[in-house]
Amino acid sequence: MSTQPNRPRIVCLPGDCIGPEVMAVAQRALRKLAPDLELEEHVFGAGAIRSTGTSLPDATLEACRAADAVLKAPIGDPEFDAADVRPEQGMLRLRAELDVYANLRPASRGEIDLLIVRELVGGLYFGARGVREDGTVFDTCEYHPTQVERIARRAFELARSRRGRLTSVDKANVLETSRLWRRVVHEVAADYVDVEVEDMLVDNAAMQLASAPEQFDVIVTENMFGDILSDLAAAMTGGLGLAPSASLSDDGPGIFEPVHGSAPDIAGRGIANPAAMLRSTALMLEHGLARPNEARALEGAVDVALHERPTRDLGGTATTAEFADAVVAAFTH
């Protein structure tokens, strides 16, 4: 897919508010660590609405489709919170167009080392919705067996590469979609006899994550449950400001982005913490470009910077630029 042989092309979406600030740090790290990559920027989010009227312009979508990976900064702007056209609409469309159905949310700290695998392009967020004549509003949760099968298989593969334990989270005592989910997960499990699998209801999973998160290895779940549980897991391991994510398809480019929002209250002040953006970049190197050595080098450099030059949100004094300096300096150690 790259325009030059053996030179992967990365589409960078700088996003909104603090997005361009943390994206600049990620690009600086990539130019130092992997100078052979082609980096190109395209407009997306609130900035795209202002310039084109849509949050995901056709040119941006086509560039993403042709890329080897998409590196995305946070989007969102209070100006569009109640508008008919919003930045978040472009995000949902981009996920659907690239069919990045597998969202990986790692969370680690001390004895905690878990990975949440969230189905990303089905369920309640993509089902039929509307308003009936009597004023009733509805959103529909739907899943096809093939959607469940492919996310389950991805989760089993990841569990096999880790500690061999998979927890499937559902609400099978209430929901038909969850009963389908549980049945298909166990059908897939027959191909992974080396992976220990258990079922857990989502309310119990939330309680267990809050009280004993060290018990988990890989958690697989549907879209909305994964959205909620992954934020809880992030809170248990340092907060959203440190949390990265990877969204993967079977054939095309993945999307790699921090979990946190665009933080309009601190935009332009040079104090944003770029750790989650950098960790998302490491996930891109590992899962999007098959470069585990560079991924580990970047992860290690971020850990050094977090220890030596923490930003204000972590109780330190480092600016965004000073944190970036510490990351780049750690590459040479």
Image (tube, rainbow, N blue to C red):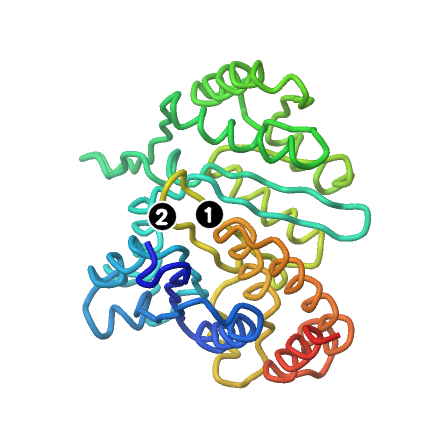
> Residue at left 61%, top 53%?
292
Q: Position of residue 244 (x, y in %)?
A: 57, 56
Q: Position of residue 308 (x, y in %)?
A: 77, 76
Amino acid type of the residue that numbered disc 1 sits on in the rendered structure: Ser
Amino acid type of the residue that numbered disc 2 sits on in the rendered structure: Arg
Horizontal arrangement in the rendering, residue 213 relative to residue 135 (left or right): right
> Residue at left 52%, top 14%?
187
Relative to 299, does residue 25 appear above or below in the rendering? below
Horizontal arrangement in the rendering, residue 299 relative to residue 286 (left or right): right
Label 1 near label 2: C-beta < 8 Å?
yes
Q: Which residue is mark 1?
A: 247
> Residue at left 43%, top 18%?
176
Q: Residues within 10 Å of mark 2 (few under 14, many from 20)?
A: some
Q: Which residue is mark 2?
A: 95
Relative to 312, does residue 42 appear above or below in the rendering? above
**Helix, strand or loop for disc 1:** strand
Marks 2 and 1 sit apart, C-alpha to C-alpha, by 8 Å
Q: State the residue in front, 76 or 132.
A: 76
> Residue at left 48%, top 58%?
257
The part of the image, by quadrant, that contains residue 173 is top right
**Helix, strand or loop for disc 2:** helix
Of mark 2 and mark 1, the one earlier in the sequence is: 2
In which quadrant will I find the N terminus?
A: bottom left
